[in-house]
Image: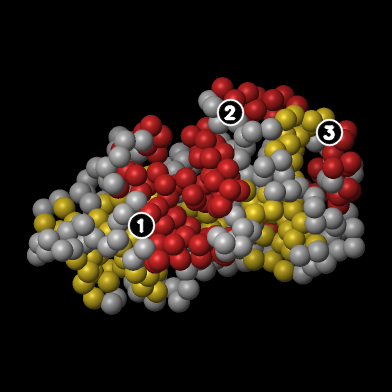
């Protein structure tokens, strides 16, 4: 069943979250008009893309991801505004930890050309002056990054999809991917719950389901891990300043940021779960309390008005997987963005679109699919 000449260049993207939507946006901007985005839910972004803390954080590991984060944050800052349909509030970030550990992180990123602009190391004594809630915080120092902040994730996702559709892409919601149709080791079409679609390229941007999509298609068997993480919201609090930066203890893994007059908090928990709607673990509340009492006693006893969980999906080395599959011609991965999908989405989509279009990219080797072939 060969694809007709008319549909040979059609690209089908599985997943309308940030990874798939950003890829579609950049593909369309690069002149690819015959795009179909499959989303199994009623609305895009109902899982990982819609259940995160919406933070733009540039100082991350590994260094290849940090370069993507730095450029992604810069691009979103330039793009954000009423015309784009989403906002980006740059109140900055404070990454807390030991002086030695933070200095090593700063030097590592600087040496790799991945350090965020204006990032500086400050002493722990001044943390409470920056954020009153950090009074008594036991961190020795902090990395201050003024270009970090909080983005309107729903608006950003809608921007990507709107731009792709404006240039001709088709979004099919409540449509499941069933299988690929091949000729030899080459994709010629996709079977879906809405019927058969002729296509020469399948982009696997299915979030926690990327491993399942690859298994069905017969692509490389990369063991991705969907990890559950909980978020807490206190409800409105009298002493919270909405202009505070977000604060993340990178050595003990917890964070807080202002949200809707109160605080959004995370205990940095990770637990392996099946792809889908994650159950809640009430015991994580105890973990959060223990971490705050040990490392930020000034926060005191905080009320919890809401608790929810989302999934972050990681590859075996916890770095991105972006590129052509070595086993199945026409199968392209945009996967394993972990907790960095919001910050890097612009650059992830740009890189993916260029690689699909046959362009050379120096960053591509850092995320190549075949790095797992010998495992």
Sooner in the amino-acid sequence: mark 1 or mark 3: 1
Instruction: Answer left or right for 134 relative to 174.
Output: right
Q: Nearer the viewer, residue 22 or 78?
A: 78
The quarter of the rendered structure image containing the C terminus is top left
User: In the image, what residue occupies the spot 77% across and 69% down?
Assistant: 305
Q: Position of residue 227 (x, y in %)?
A: 53, 54
Q: Is residue 10 above or below residue 175?
A: above
Residue, disc 2: 109
Which of the 4 image quarters holds residue 144?
A: top right
Q: Nearer the viewer, residue 347 or 278?
A: 347
Residue, disc 3: 124
Q: Nearer the viewer, residue 358 or 327?
A: 358
Q: Position of residue 42 (x, y in %)?
A: 45, 76
User: Is there CB contact under 8 Å for labels 1 and 3?
Assistant: no
Mark in front: 2 vs 1? 1
User: In the image, what residue occupies the spot 62% across and 34% down?
Assistant: 116
> Dot 2 lies on which element?
helix
Residue, disc 1: 28
> Dot 3 lies on which element?
helix
Q: CA distance from mark 2 to mark 1?
A: 32 Å
User: In the image, what residue occupies the spot 77% across and 56% down?
Assistant: 258
The quarter of the rendered structure image containing the N terminus is bottom left
Sooner in the amino-acid sequence: mark 3 or mark 2: 2
Q: Is residue 145 above or below residue 12?
A: above
Q: Is residue 113 above or below residue 1?
A: above
Return the mark for residue 348. none
Q: CA distance from mark 1 to mark 3?
A: 47 Å
Q: CA distance from mark 3 to mark 2?
A: 21 Å
């Amino acid at each position: 069943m060969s694809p007709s000449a008319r549909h040979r260049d059609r690209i089908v993207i599985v997943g309308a979250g940030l990874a798939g939507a950003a890829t579609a946006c950049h593909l369309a901007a690069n002149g690819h008009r015959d795009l179909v985005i499959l989303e199994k839910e009623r609305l895009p972004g109902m899982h990982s893309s819609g259940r995160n803390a919406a933070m733009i954080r540039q100082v991350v590991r590994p260094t290849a991801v940090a370069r993507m984060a730095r450029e992604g944050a810069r691009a979103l800052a330039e793009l954000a505004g009423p015309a784009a349909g989403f906002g980006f509030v740059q109140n900055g970030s404070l990454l807390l930890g030991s002086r030695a550990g933070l200095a090593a992180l700063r030097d590592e990123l600087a040496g790799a050309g991945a350090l965020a602009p204006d990032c500086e190391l400050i002493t722990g004594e001044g943390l409470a002056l920056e954020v009153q809630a950090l009074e008594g915080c036991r961190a020795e120092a902090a990395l201050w990054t003024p270009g970090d902040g909080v983005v309107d994730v729903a608006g950003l996702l809608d921007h990507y999809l709107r731009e792709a559709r404006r240039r001709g892409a088709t979004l099919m919601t409540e449509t499941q991917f069933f299988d690929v149709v091949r000729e030899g080791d080459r994709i010629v079409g996709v079977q879906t719950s809405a019927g058969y679609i002729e296509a020469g390229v399948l982009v696997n941007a299915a979030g926690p389901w990327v491993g399942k999509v690859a298994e069905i298609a017969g692509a490389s068997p990369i063991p991705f891990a969907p990890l559950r993480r909980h978020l807490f919201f206190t409800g409105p609090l009298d002493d919270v300043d909405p202009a505070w930066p977000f604060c993340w203890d990178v050595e003990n893994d917890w964070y807080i940021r202002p949200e809707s007059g109160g605080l959004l908090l995370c205990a940095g928990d990770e637990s392996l779960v099946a792809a889908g709607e994650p159950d809640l673990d009430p015991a994580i509340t105890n973990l959060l309390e223990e971490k705050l009492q040990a490392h930020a006693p000034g926060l005191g006893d905080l009320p919890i008005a809401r608790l929810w969980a989302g999934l972050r999906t990681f590859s075996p080395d916890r770095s991105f997987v972006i590129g052509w599959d070595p086993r199945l011609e026409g199968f392209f991965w945009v996967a394993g963005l972990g907790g960095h999908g919001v910050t890097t989405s612009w650059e992830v989509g740009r890189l993916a679109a260029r690689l699909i279009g046959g362009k050379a990219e120096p960053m591509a080797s850092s995320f190549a699919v075949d790095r797992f072939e010998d495992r």
